[in-house]
Image: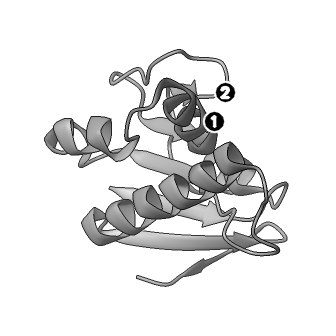
């Protein structure tokens, strides 16, 4: 698995398209559930927010499908910077997104941080 992360609007998906042979991308801001046949998942943080709203842990789906995700690329926006939100749902989202990123980084063969469209391998 390859985890690509970075701030919002930093060119994560463009970086993935330019550097990897992507045939099918699952945009999780549009899909109700991840499509396991995709070779790349983007906007994973949208899936996390949907899980917060449903009261389920986002990491569970990724744990259950760990073997199937071994050759996939997962793109996540890092929302850990800045002021801690007052709204409890937004705070829960930020915490759940962080837990998922820690899990994915631990399982990934490669972790790439993208900033201003430039990827830097950190694992």
The circle on residue 54 is none
**Crowd rating for badge 1 (residues with CA inside 10 Å; few <14, some 14–19, many 20+):** many
* Residue 108 position in % (x across, y down): 32, 64
**Crowd rating for badge 2 (residues with CA inside 10 Å; few <14, some 14–19, many 20+):** some
The circle on residue 46 is 1
Quadrant of image for the N terminus: bottom left
**Outermost residue toward the bottom in this view:** 122
* Residue 79 position in % (x across, y down): 69, 62
Q: How is the image coloured?
A: one colour
Q: CA distance from mark 1 to mark 2?
A: 5 Å
* Residue 80 position in % (x across, y down): 66, 70
Per the image, label 1 sits on a secondary structure element best described as helix
Closer to the chain start, of discs 1 and 2, is 2
Left/right of residue 120 with respect to residue 68 in the rendered view:
right
> How many callouts does the rendering have?
2
* Residue 36 position in % (x across, y down): 33, 24
Query: Do labels 1 and 2 touch, CB within 8 Å?
Result: yes
Mark 2, residue position: 29
């Amino acid at each position: 698995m390859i985890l690509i992360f970075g701030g919002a609007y930093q060119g994560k998906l463009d970086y993935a398209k330019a550097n990897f042979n992507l045939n099918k991308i699952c945009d999780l801001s549009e899909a109700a559930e991840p499509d396991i046949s995709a070779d790349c998942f983007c906007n994973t943080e949208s899936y996390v927010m949907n899980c917060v709203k449903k009261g389920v842990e986002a990491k569970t789906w990724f744990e259950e499908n760990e073997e199937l995700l071994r050759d996939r690329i997962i793109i996540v926006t890092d929302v850990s910077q800045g002021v801690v939100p007052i709204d409890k749902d937004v705070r829960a989202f930020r915490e759940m997104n962080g837990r998922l990123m820690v899990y994915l980084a631990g399982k990934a063969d490669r972790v790439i941080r993208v900033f201003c469209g430039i990827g830097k391998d950190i694992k």
